């Protein structure tokens, strides 16, 4: 396990998290607290700050390749290169279950060099979905704040994907809502 120390990414993440907090505090809309369905959170010592429940901030997993983990550690996530065919849109996907993210790590050629990122993700006010959002570049508009989309999409186990969603999935469409904090290298 390797801790990522990227001060510029951290500063940008904090700024975006604070902007989401300010927007949520100023609005008359209520935010769905995901802590009721995102129970497990790793006890990582030495993290920069505690997680912020008021903006639905979580540690989540992201499976990737060793090469992409290095790129993400240096430059952050980039939603501009996300696949348009993603089930919940062209965003960055995360899971609270390592086994879900492992599915994306294990697609690599060598199963002895698997990689997963542990990231801080600010979900803000999430759109809880039951359907697909393929081809979308952002979360749906929030009907309580016309012209402003939700901050993310939350696909809940047993509800999303017409009820056949097997794991909770979290999708953000803004790279600044994610801070990659740890690279985990493992073998199976």
Image (tube, rainbow, N blue to C red):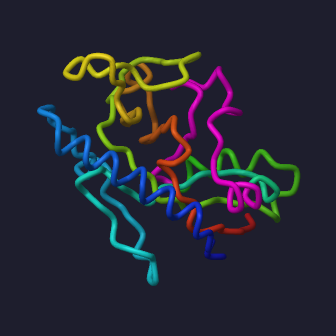
Q: Look at the image and tell me whether residue 42 can be seen.
A: yes
In the picture, measured across the screen, residue 8 lies left or right of residue 170, that is: right
Magenta residues (range): 69-97
The image position of residue 111, as x and y in percent, is 81, 58
**Viewer-side residue, 11 vs 175:** 11
In the picture, measured across the screen, residue 175 lies left or right of residue 47, that is: right
Rendered view: 182 above or below 26 = below
The image position of residue 62, as x and y in percent, is 59, 51
Rendered view: 69 above or below 134 = below
Q: Look at the image and tell me whether residue 1 can be seen.
A: no
Residue drawn 24% across the image and 17% down it:
143
Residue drawn 21% across the image and 39% down it:
32
Rendered view: 90 above or below 100 = above
Q: Is residue 83 shown in magenta?
A: yes
Residue drawn 45% across the image and 77% down it:
47
Rendered view: 94 above or below 69 = above
């Amino acid at each position: 396990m390797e801790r990522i120390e990227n001060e510029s990414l951290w500063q940008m993440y904090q700024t975006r998290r604070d902007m989401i907090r300010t927007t949520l505090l100023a609005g008359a809309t209520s935010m769905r607290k995901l802590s009721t369905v995102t129970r497990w959170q790793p006890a990582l010592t030495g993290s920069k700050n505690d997680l912020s429940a008021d903006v639905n901030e979580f540690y989540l997993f992201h499976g990737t390749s060793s090469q992409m983990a290095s790129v993400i550690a240096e430059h952050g996530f980039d939603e501009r290169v996300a696949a348009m065919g993603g089930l919940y849109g062209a965003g960055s996907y995360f899971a609270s279950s390592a086994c879900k993210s492992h599915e994306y790590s294990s697609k690599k050629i060598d199963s002895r060099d698997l990689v997963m990122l542990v990231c801080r993700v600010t979900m803000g006010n999430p759109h809880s979905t039951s359907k697909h959002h393929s081809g979308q570049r952002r979360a749906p508009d929030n009907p309580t704040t016309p012209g402003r989309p939700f901050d993310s999409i939350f696909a809940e186990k047993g509800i999303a994907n017409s009820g056949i969603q097997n794991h909770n999935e979290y999708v953000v469409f803004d790279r600044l809502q994610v801070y990659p904090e740890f690279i985990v290298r493992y073998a199976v």
